[in-house]
Image: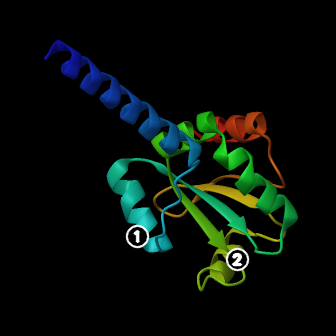
Amino acid sequence: MKKGIGILALALIAIAAMTSLTKSDSGIEFDHLTMEKAQKKAAKSEKLIFIDAYTDWCGPCKRMAATTFKDSEVAEFFNDEFINLKIEMEKNPEGNSIARKYGVRAYPTLLIIDSDGNLVKKTIGFKTKDQLMAFAGSAL
């Protein structure tokens, strides 16, 4: 009986470890919301909105998505502190209006806005983990 419980406990620990590993490996969790819904969610949760304004053809955008956004420390921070949106600026119907409103002219452009849609912070270009964390931290 004790041996069975021990094996069960080890199995549960292994499952828990695999689950947390999988979650941290997934990176920043980007919501698939309209701006209006994101702003309502931000107001309700008292969080700011982080927007990755990108295009499919942008090399630095792809590199950030594969590296910086996948970092477990970055993911944990952004998932805890922000409503995260990833918006393809040429194909997403809202992309054009977002680009006009926030002056997006190069990619990637990273935006932090409040629940009223006011720009809090903006930066352009590829960011390393440390650069992205400093950018986001300065907006809080």
Q: Position of residue 117 (x, y in %)?
A: 53, 64
Question: Which residue is the extreme one toward the top?
Answer: 2
The disc, 1 or 2, on the residue closer to the chain's N-terminal end is 1
Q: Is residue 48 above or below residue 34?
A: above
Q: Which residue occupies 38% across, 35% down?
A: 15
Q: Position of residue 63 (x, y in %)?
A: 80, 55
Q: Which residue occupies 31% across, 30% down?
A: 12
Q: Which residue occupies 63% across, 70% down?
A: 87
Q: Is residue 57 above or below residue 85?
A: below
Report helix, strand or loop for mark 2.
loop
Asked whether the residues under the numbered discs 1 and 2 touch, taking CB atoms below 8 Å apart as contact, a structural biologist would say no
Count of labels in the image = 2
Q: Quadrant of the C terminus?
A: top right
Report helix, strand or loop for mark 1.
helix
Q: Quadrant of residue 37?
A: bottom left
Identify which amino acid the numbered label 2 is placed on. Answer: Met
In front: 39, or 58?
Answer: 58
- Residue beneath label 2, please? 89
- Residue beneath label 1, please? 37
Q: Position of residue 100 (x, y in %)?
A: 71, 77
Q: Quadrant of residue 25?
A: top right
Q: Is residue 53 above or below residue 50?
A: below
Q: Quadrant of the N terminus?
A: top left
Q: CA distance from mark 1 to mark 2?
A: 18 Å
Identify which amino acid the numbered label 1 is placed on. Answer: Lys
